Image: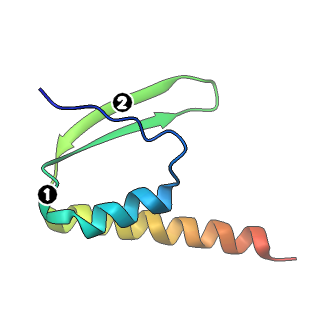
């Protein structure tokens, strides 16, 4: 059985950086999404290494753009 560890308080950047640093150790990916209505969707999937890297890079770029947009006056 998989060990579930809480990442409460961890930033998305920290999670993605950890994923890139430890990519060889990742077997599957679990994701949870908190929707505006308060509901949570959870799931997991096997993922090929190349697709995992693409996912992490895409999410990092989205975060950068969001942060940059927030800084514009």
Q: Which residue is mark 2?
A: 42
**Residue at horizontal 81%, vertical 77%?**
72
Pick the front one: 23 or 70: 23
Q: Quadrant location of the N terminus?
A: top left
Q: Which residue is mark 1?
A: 25
User: In the picture provided, is 55 more to the left or to the right than 40?
Assistant: left
Look at discs 2 and 1 and give the one toward the viewer. Answer: 1
Q: Secondary structure at mark 1?
A: helix
Q: At x 50% / y 38%, what residue is drawn?
A: 8
As displayed, is residue 22 above or below residue 39?
Answer: below
Numbered circle sitting on residue 36? none
Q: Residue 69: x and y, percent?
A: 72, 71
The quadrant holding residue 51 is bottom left
Under circle 2, the secondary element is strand
Distance in Å between CA atoms under marks 2 and 1: 21 Å
Q: How is the image coloured?
A: rainbow
């Amino acid at each position: 059985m998989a060990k579930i560890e809480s990442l409460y308080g961890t930033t998305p950047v920290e999670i993605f950086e950890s994923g890139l640093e430890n990519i060889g150790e990742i077997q599957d990916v679990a994701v949870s999404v908190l929707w505006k209505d308060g509901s949570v969707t959870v799931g997991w999937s096997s993922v090929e290494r190349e697709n995992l890297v693409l996912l992490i890079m895409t999410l990092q770029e989205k975060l950068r753009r969001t942060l940059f947009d927030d800084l514009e006056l």
